[in-house]
Amino acid sequence: MGWLAAGDTYEVALVDGRVVARAAPTTVRGGQEAKRERTLPAEIRDRPEVVELQRFAQWLDRHAAQCAARVTTWMVSSLPVPTALLARVWPDEAWRNALRDVVVAGDGPGQVGFLRDADDSGALRVVNAAGQSVRLTAPTVTLPHPVLLTGLDELRAYAAESGVVQGVEQLDRATWLRPAALEGAAEVREFAGAEYRSWFHLSARATALGYTVSGSSVVDRIRDAGRIVTATVGMSDPYTEEKAWTGTLVWNDEDGHRRLAAADIGPVAWSEGMRMAAALHAGRTAPRDGSAPRDGTGSTDGARATDGAE
């Protein structure tokens, strides 16, 4: 984007997401290049050119956040995405920043790699973990959740060696595998008892992480293998407790009424539920007196299953 005149003595432009100013060329002596001002001069802050550029910068930030959020949704849900759609949005810098180097999977063996380009024909160019360039022409691809990626360690190693930086959290996303021995209705107490100063601090932490607060629970609705699973972490009642604590993590059906047996919880739903509980636990207020956490968080059991689904 070029420089715009803002009055007779300054020009403004959008650089790295913010509005900057410099002296107008007509005011610079000796043909020297005008230097950028460290801050916007007070005399031009309310000029229409500056205000419109600031609004445009805000729109660009929102657009970039929306693109990243949409790509994250595709990835967490492992939804099929038309390659023609990826090619259509690729010229947009915000979309490209969110999509570049995300791991995509085609419809055949060996068609997994880091997305590097999408051309007008709808074909995608990806680079696999061996550093080889592969052209994908399948009608749709998936952006797999990392817990579903075969060869995840190899992909992470290649990314580290090649300096790959993803625009969305995929390879670096924390994952958990469901213990094979669990039976009955699953519940996890490993992250219960995390103390917060108040219910409002805990709910603010939950919403900032992108989760929903419903009554005395933090909820994440997860699409796993085509069905919706509701992961829920209990929390204290704001009307009866001065402080707040996280509770047990459980998984329910889409309506949230029937507790799921461990065997009915898919790998994505298990991993994302654990990720939510761990993130809430990480934001806790540490007890000052060194007392044991509430609700038995000192236990090393991590996860267990009750007898029978509720």
Image: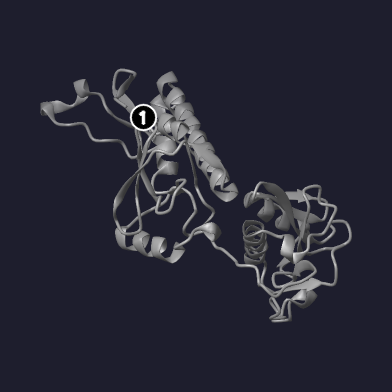
The quarter of the rendered structure image containing the C terminus is: bottom right
Residue at (67, 59) in percent of width and height: 273
Answer whether residue 46 is visible to the viewer in this image.
Answer: no
Residue in front for this viewpoint, 70 or 224: 224
Horizontal side, residue 165 vs residue 224: left or right: left
Residue at (34, 28) in percent of width and height: 13
Sort mark 1 into few (<14), some (14-19) or many (20+) by Cα contacts within 10 Å.
few
Residue in front for this viewpoint, 291 or 110: 110
Answer whether residue 85 is visible to the viewer in this image.
Answer: yes
The quarter of the rendered structure image containing the N terminus is: top left
Residue 160 image point, x, y percent: 35, 62
Amino acid under disc 1: Ser
Q: Which residue is mark 1?
A: 121
Residue at (67, 68) in percent of width and height: 285
Q: Quadrant of residue 88?
A: top left
Q: Which residue extends farthest left?
A: 30
Horizontal side, residue 66 vs residue 164: left or right: right
